[in-house]
Amino acid sequence: MLIKKFLHFYFFQMMAMIGGAIGLIVKLSAFQDWYLHLNKPWFGPSDNLLSVVWVFIHVLLGITGYLLWHNTYHEGEEKTNTDGIFILLYLQLVLTFGWMWIFFGLQLPLVAFFEKVISLVVLILMVKQSFKISKFVSSFYAVYTLWTLYLLAFNLSIIQLNR
């Protein structure tokens, strides 16, 4: 049973970290040529802060994914009414990875902004649905929602300052 729990934890952690690593690679490839030359708002994150927060968020995404699984299933049987929490979880992971790719890789801040709006809606649903399963996980998604609001404001400012 312990090995099974470890494998599930490892699965969620690796899924989050691989996506995060791909996002960082995309960011670094566009950083010197594009991002450094953009006009940025006064409240923009420092160049290093964005990378540190990105890694931290992905570690927590892996942990919370595992905790959702662990608190939802016990020996293969569903414990609670999850209301599609894992669909939301996987969608949120794709959206999280996608923003870095769209914003930095494709260099499309306007498209990235709308992608982040969709991510915000999914996060709000995640807060609501995960609260039924784990208050800790729900509180992480609430804080992540605040970070997403910050990124939305930052993203919108990039669009406005670089027309």
Image (cartoon, rainbow, N blue to C red):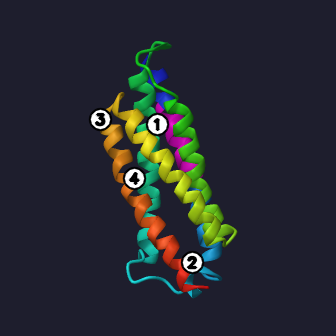
Vertical position of residue 45 compared to residue 131: above or below: below
Instruction: Answer with mark 1 or mark 2, whichever residue precedes in sequence.
Output: 1
2 vs 4, front mark: 2
The residue tagged with tag 2: helix, strand or loop?
A: helix
Q: Are marks 3 and 2 in contact (CB under 8 Å)?
A: no
Q: Position of residue 13 (x, y in %)?
A: 49, 41
| Residue that label 2 marks | 159
Instruction: Answer with mark 3 or mark 4, whichever residue precedes in sequence.
Output: 3
The residue tagged with tag 1: helix, strand or loop?
A: helix
Q: Are marks 3 and 1 in contact (CB under 8 Å)?
A: no
Q: CA distance from mark 3 to mark 1?
A: 13 Å
Q: CA distance from mark 3 to mark 4?
A: 14 Å
Residue at the spot x=46%, y=33% of the render? 9
| Residue that label 3 marks | 135
Instruction: Answer with mark 3 or mark 1, whichever residue precedes in sequence.
Output: 1
Q: Amino acid at mark 3?
A: Lys
Q: Amino acid at mark 2?
A: Ile
The residue tagged with tag 3: helix, strand or loop?
A: helix
Q: Which residues are magenta?
A: 9-19
Which label number is shown at residue 144?
Answer: 4
Residue 12 is one of the magenta-drawn residues: yes
Q: Are marks 2 and 4 in contact (CB under 8 Å)?
A: no
10 Å crowding of disc 1: few (<14), some (14-19), many (20+): many
1 vs 4, front mark: 4
Residue at the spot x=39%, y=41% of the render? 127
Q: Amino acid at mark 4?
A: Tyr
